Image (cartoon, grey):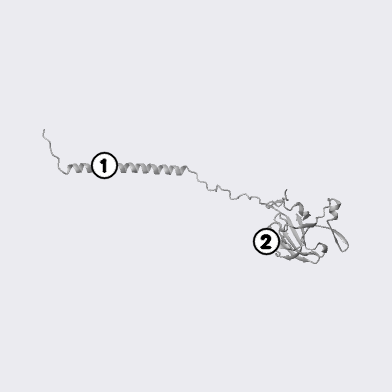
Amino acid sequence: MKTKKLKGWVLPTIYACFFIGIFLVTVGVSNVLLEKSSREQENESESINYVSDSIIDEETPVIQQIETILKPYTDTDIKISKYYYDYKGDETKQESSLIYHDNTYMQNSGVDYTKDEVFNVVSILDGTVINVKEDELLGKCVEIKHDNNYTSIYQSLSEVNVKKGDSVLRGQLIGKSGENKIDKDMGNHLHFELYIKGQIVDPLEYIDKEVKKEDNSNQAQE
């Protein structure tokens, strides 16, 4: 049996054709896979329902900020010389809550804090100064309106550090203690009054108690 010797260009040509064929098959398979993937992505996009509304409620609920009503002073050695006159209180306390002026006894409408030396007077809560005046009998006076139907009044001041229309912060200095002519024997002191919804109340029942700022109808709580 005779064998024929292949020419030198035949084998390289066969190998070249073989690899070209493999390449074309690979490219074809890749294109098919890409087309399939593209179709699947399109189908997934069509099946998704996009929500135009925000999933976050824009009306974030307001958290009520609870604050404690401060004493109207910062010193630690302040004493009470006269209490608020309580119609329901006992006779002994009522007698000690009277102010004698010009041959007349008057019921004390607030609390009087005393100290030998002049002391700082501060706002009991955040608020707005609605009145600053100097009264012939009561001395310098400051009135502050708060956000919860509370109004605080500071009288017998020797110095005032705020003016009408000022916004003040809880604990901010608004003046210094002093004297008045309606109760000269008391000497250096602060006369402090508290109103809620326009009604005068005993300040000692509310000082150091909590009040909710966001609820205008709330009163101080234990």
Mark 1 surroundings: few (<14), some (14-19) or many (≥20) residues within 10 A: few
In the image, is residue 84 above or below residue 40? below
Q: Name the outermost residue toward the left.
A: 2
Provide the residue designation for mark 1. 21
Residue 148, given in percent of the width and then of the height, sits at: 71, 54
Relative placement, left or right, of 67 versus 30 is right
- Label 2 or label 1, whichever lies nearer to me, is 2
Q: Are marks 2 and 1 in contact (CB under 8 Å)?
A: no
Relative placement, left or right, of 21 versus 147 is left
* Quadrant of the image containing the N terminus: top left
Q: Name the outermost residue toward the top.
A: 1
In the image, is residue 118 above or below residue 52? below
Residue name at image x 31 percent, y 42 percent = 26
Q: Quadrant of residue 72?
A: bottom right
Residue name at image x 75 percent, y 59 percent = 153
| Mark 2 → mark 1, Cα distance in angstroms | 86 Å
Amino acid type, mark 1: Gly
Q: Is residue 110 visible?
A: no
Q: Secondary structure at mark 2?
A: strand
Q: Secondary structure at mark 1?
A: helix
Provide the residue designation for mark 2. 167
